[in-house]
Image: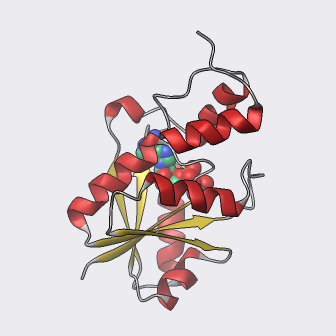
Amino acid sequence: MKRAIYPGSFDPITNGHLNIVERALDVFDRVTIVISTNSQKVPLFELSDSIRMVSEATKCWSQVDVDHNDGLTVDYARRNGIHTAIRGLRAVTDFEHEFSMALTNRSLWGEFDTVFLMTKAEYMYLSSSVVRQVAQLGGDISQFVPKCVENELREKFDKKPKA
Ligand code: ADP
């Protein structure tokens, strides 16, 4: 069985993330989305909310499960006997950071590899931070995120989409 983890902040999960999961399922039998706390970012959502939204957004795929991890990605992977991480690549801007992280992870555990998948062109500039900003300003985010996330964001910022 080919297994992979998809680690990230998912704050919140977007259609860009989901497109990567869908592509990963063409290659892997089982994908575990691992919600990780990123020390460089202050999260908008509580971990329990993120787990609930990611679970809801991926419930149509029985080969996907959701977990969380506070420590190193490679430690999580080793504990679970998984040797591959999936990461998404958008514009060139992602490359430098992703490249350094992939090589660092491989230095930490020589049996660990990162597989990069490219998103659909329409999601190329979509990020959780852009979604958070648009939602905070009351913009329509329905094309960027699954329905459950749209509802939670709207509730959080207590605003209706502008016509
Ligand atoms: P992190 O804080 O670890 O970067 P993110 O949730 O922002 O967590 O992203 C997790 C992964 O998903 C990263 O590899 C990121 O490049 C990728 N990703 C995020 N948004 C998109 C998108 N729109 N298309 C493709 N990949 C994406």
Residue in the picture at 74% in, 56% down:
40
In front here: 53 or 32? 53
Residue in the picture at 55% in, 39% down:
127
Q: Is residue 57 above or below residue 162?
A: below
Identify the image quadrant of residue 59: bottom left
| Number of residue marks | 0
Question: Is the C terminus in the top left, top right, bottom left or bottom right quadrant?
Answer: top right
x then y, percent, for residue 146: 47, 41
Residue in the picture at 33% in, 77% down:
3
Tell me, yes or no, if residue 89 can be seen here: no
x then y, percent, for residue 25: 27, 62
Q: Is residue 1 above or below residue 56?
A: below
x then y, percent, for residue 125: 48, 32
Question: Is the N terminus in the top left, top right, bottom left or bottom right quadrant?
Answer: bottom left
x then y, percent, for residue 106: 47, 77
Residue in the picture at 48% in, 82% down:
77
Colour scheme employed for the rendering of this structure: secondary structure
- Single out the residue that lies furthest toward the top: 163
In front here: 79 or 48? 48
| 158 horizontally vs 132: left or right | right
- Single out the residue that lies furthest toward the left: 26
Tell me, yes or no, if residue 10 can be seen here: yes
| 145 horizontally vs 63: left or right | right
Q: Is residue 70 above or below residue 141?
A: below
Identify the image quadrant of residue 39: bottom right
In front here: 57 or 74? 57
